Image (cartoon, rainbow, N blue to C red):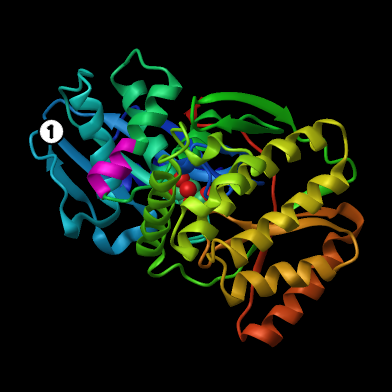
């Protein structure tokens, strides 16, 4: 039995309903470079993975919505009606799809019948590979499919982000939803978060692959620290705006920043802004290097990105720093850095294929020695964005 056949059977068991179901899927993502730049109006360079969140769905004839996740069996079936779209603490994960539904309805999409969805995600939990954006986009494509809505992917990306910002209350940028919605097999996406202009870039890694390493450190308190970083960057921008006509830190070059950085009176805010400005420049440079086939340069920029996230943005921590340092020390590592929000979660490395086994063994062993528990490793395949599976 394939995974999707199994999920259809689970749907029947859980909801006690025979009949036609449809299956939707949205991937997780990994960001190659451009971290904490999205909400600063800079560039990011993520790609979609081939694991993610499945949703088996069926329309109902009444106004009931019933949701179930195989990843959160304890919460059982979460049930509400189309007229009860309020955040509820005890609905846990269910608030993400509920929020998406609410934003769709607020935008005037005609959803006048209820539905059932059974979810299953194979993104490692809390790893910073965007399981929430994946859940949101699975829900978005399911709503589009079930209710035959005329809506394009970018609008669904924006509505999913809005659900997370306004309904769930996490002030994330647009990168995760964009990568999860717009991903393409074998490609990374260079996205300008100021304008939402984007372009696909073929990931020509030659005889190397992307290895994701999970610190297995849970990201507790990550949300509040994330919001704190956003606040510091906003403050820095306000002070720069006393002299500069810019709308975001992403509009600044390194030289412009150096010229005017004294306007930022708080040392910490200045360091945060410095990261945002230079990380954006690095991202643009990295994509040019990749397109020229200069992987070595790409790897050096990944390293510089991590150092800046460690020293200026201060979002790494012992586990991420250990994992990245061990990766840098391995023969065959082209580049390695933390990925996602930080404070735990994963690193992304580019490693020569013939050295991957050795990488996993050496980095894995030394990580346990230094940290006391194990890391996990996945060799990533770059897949397509959110869609119905036929
Ligand atoms: C999280 C957020 C993104 C982005 C990254 C950091 O993944 O959801 O919007 O800000 O952190 O680059």
Q: Residue at x 36, y 22 (%)?
A: 145
Front one among 302 and 101: 302
Viewer can see residue 56: no
Q: Residue at x 74, y 38 (%)?
A: 285
Instruction: Give the total number of marks visible in the rendering.
Output: 1
- Left or right of residue 378, residue 251 in this image: left
User: Element type at marker 1?
Assistant: loop
Indicate yes or no: mark 1 CB to ligand 1 under 8 Å: no
Figure quadrant of residue 216: bottom right
Does the segment drawn in magenta span residue 167? yes
Question: How many C-alpha atoms fall within 10 Å of the one at disc 1: few (<14), some, or many (≥20)?
Answer: some
Q: Residue at x 90, y 45 (%)?
A: 207
Front one among 111 and 236: 236
Query: Which residue in the protein does label 1 denote?
Result: 82
- Residue 205 in the image: state x and y as whole percent: 83, 41
Q: Which residues are magenta?
A: 162-168
Viewer can see residue 144: yes
């Amino acid at each position: 039995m394939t995974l999707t056949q199994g999920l259809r059977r689970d749907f029947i068991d859980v909801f006690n309903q025979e009949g036609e179901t449809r299956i939707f899927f949205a991937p997780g993502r990994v960001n190659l470079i451009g971290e904490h730049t999205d909400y600063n109006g800079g560039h990011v360079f993520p790609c979609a993975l081939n694991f993610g969140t499945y949703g088996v769905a069926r329309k109902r004839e009444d106004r009931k919505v019933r949701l179930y996740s195989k990843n959160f069996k304890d919460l059982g079936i979460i049930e509400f009606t189309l007229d009860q779209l309020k955040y509820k603490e005890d609905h846990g994960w269910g608030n993400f799809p509920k929020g998406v539904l609410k934003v769709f309805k607020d935008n005037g999409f005609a959803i006048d019948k209820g539905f059932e969805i059974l979810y299953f995600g194979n993104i490692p939990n809390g790893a910073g590979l965007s399981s929430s954006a994946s859940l949101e986009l699975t829900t978005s494509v399911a709503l589009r499919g079930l209710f035959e809505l005329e809506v394009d992917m970018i609008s669904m990306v924006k509505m999913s982000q809005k659900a997370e910002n306004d309904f769930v209350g996490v002030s994330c940028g647009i990168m995760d939803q964009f990568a999860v919605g717009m991903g393409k097999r074998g490609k990374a996406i260079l996205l300008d978060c100021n304008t939402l202009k984007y372009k696909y870039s073929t990931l020509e890694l030659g005889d190397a692959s992307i290895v994701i390493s999970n610190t297995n450190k849970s990201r507790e308190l990550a949300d509040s620290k994330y919001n704190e970083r956003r606040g510091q960057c906003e403050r820095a921008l306000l002070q720069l705006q006393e002299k500069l006509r810019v709308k975001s830190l992403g509009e600044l070059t390194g030289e412009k920043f150096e010229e005017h950085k004294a306007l930022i009176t708080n040392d910490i805010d200045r360091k945060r802004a410095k990261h945002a400005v230079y990380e954006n420049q690095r991202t643009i440079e990295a994509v040019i290097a990749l397109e020229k086939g200069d992987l070595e340069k790409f790897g050096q920029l990944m390293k510089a990105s991590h150092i800046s996230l460690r020293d200026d943005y201060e979002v790494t921590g012992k586990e991420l720093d250990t994992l990245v340092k061990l990766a840098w020390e391995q023969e065959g590592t082209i580049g390695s850095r933390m990925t996602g929000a930080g404070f735990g979660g994963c690193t992304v490395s580019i490693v020569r294929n013939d050295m991957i086994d050795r990488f996993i063994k050496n980095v894995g062993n030394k990580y346990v020695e230094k940290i006391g528990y194990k890391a996990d490793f996945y060799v990533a395949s770059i897949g397509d964005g959110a869609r119905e599976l036929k």
